[in-house]
């Protein structure tokens, strides 16, 4: 036990400066919590198990108390942090208006459609606020596109080659060639060894699939 405690303390002391930062370094939507998408954006190698280990009260969001806890610092210290931390709305808002226009959003996510923009623009004012950009629906939409413009998510019908209405590990791996069995299990939330439409389009699934293009 003493050996484990010493190892834990040593790991915590060697954690990166980014890992030691509070919730403000990863909270891009200003709600004082970090979602899994926000935390993974800052630490791309963070797994679902890592997130669950930090999320002590199982509310699927990370508070400042949780992220600054010693055990969380150990977990984050093992993960590779994005240089400079998470970029929020300011990174997209090139004209400094405090909002993101359709052109600015498409510049960041080539391939994003006018329909996508309209879905994100909840109040139909033709501009995206921070609250809109980091809303749950917007995160699902934006997560379909990586920074290079390729579509992260393919339709279920494209991968469902046997016409079962579900995607197997083999079918998903044919498109996402780096997908592992562990990745598949994270997406398969009901553990029935197949991925449904709802599971495939879940925000957490998009994070997993985006790593395996």
Image (cartoon, grey):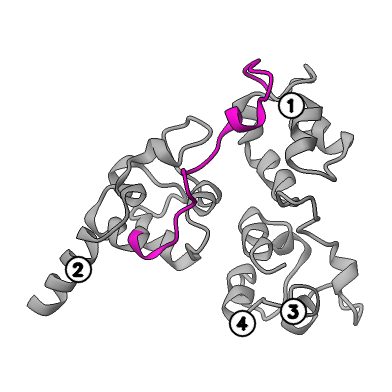
Residue 173, numbered label: 3
Q: Which of marks 2 and 1 is nearer the N terminus?
A: 2
Residue drawn at x 40%, y 47% is 62
Mark 2 → mark 1, Cα distance in angstroms: 45 Å
Q: Is residue 15 or residue 117 the one in the foreground? A: 15
Q: In this view, does 210 lie above or below 28?
A: below
Q: Residue 93: say if magenta.
A: yes
Q: Nearer the viewer, mark 2 or mark 4?
A: 2
Residue 1 makes an appearance in the image: no
Segment colored magenta? 77-99
Q: Which of marks 3 and 2 is nearer the N terminus?
A: 2
Residue depicted at x 69% and y 41%: 137
Is residue 179 visible in the rendered image? The answer is yes
Does the segment drawn in magenta span residue 79? yes
> Can you tell which mark lies on residue 82?
none
How far is the residue under mark 4 from the one under mark 1?
A: 37 Å
C-alpha gap between disc 4 and disc 3: 9 Å
Residue 5 percent location from the top left of the image: 13, 71
Reading the image, the residue beneath label 1 is: 122
The residue identified by callout 2 is 8
Residue 181: mark: 4
**Closer-to-camera residue (189/106):** 106
Image spot of residue 38 (x, y percent): 52, 46
N-terminal of the two: label 1 or label 3?
Answer: 1
- Indicate the quadrant where residue 105 lies: top right
Give SS at disc 3: helix
Q: In which quarter of the image is residue 189?
A: bottom right
Labelled pair 4, 3 in contact (Cβ < 8 Å) = no
Q: Quadrant of the C terminus?
A: bottom right
């Amino acid at each position: 036990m003493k050996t484990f405690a010493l190892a834990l303390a040593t790991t915590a002391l060697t954690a990166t400066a980014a890992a030691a930062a509070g919730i403000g370094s990863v909270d891009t939507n200003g709600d004082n919590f970090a979602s899994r998408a926000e935390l993974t954006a800052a630490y791309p190698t963070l797994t679902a198990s890592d997130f669950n280990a930090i999320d002590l009260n199982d509310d699927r969001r990370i508070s400042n108390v949780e992220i600054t806890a010693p055990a969380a610092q150990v977990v984050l210290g093992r993960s590779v942090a994005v240089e400079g931390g998470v970029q929020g709305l300011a990174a997209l808002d090139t004209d400094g208006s405090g909002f993101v226009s359709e052109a600015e959003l498409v510049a960041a996510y080539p391939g994003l459609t006018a329909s996508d923009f309209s879905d994100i623009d909840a109040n139909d004012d033709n501009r995206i606020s921070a609250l809109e950009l980091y809303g749950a629906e917007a995160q699902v939409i934006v997560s379909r596109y990586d920074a290079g413009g390729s579509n992260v998510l393919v339709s279920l019908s494209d991968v469902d080659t046997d016409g079962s209405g579900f995607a197997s590990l083999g079918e998903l791996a044919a498109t996402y060639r780096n997908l592992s069995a562990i990745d598949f299990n994270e997406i398969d939330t009901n553990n029935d060894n197949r991925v449904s439409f709802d599971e495939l389009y879940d925000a957490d699934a998009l994070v997993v699939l985006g790593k395996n293009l």
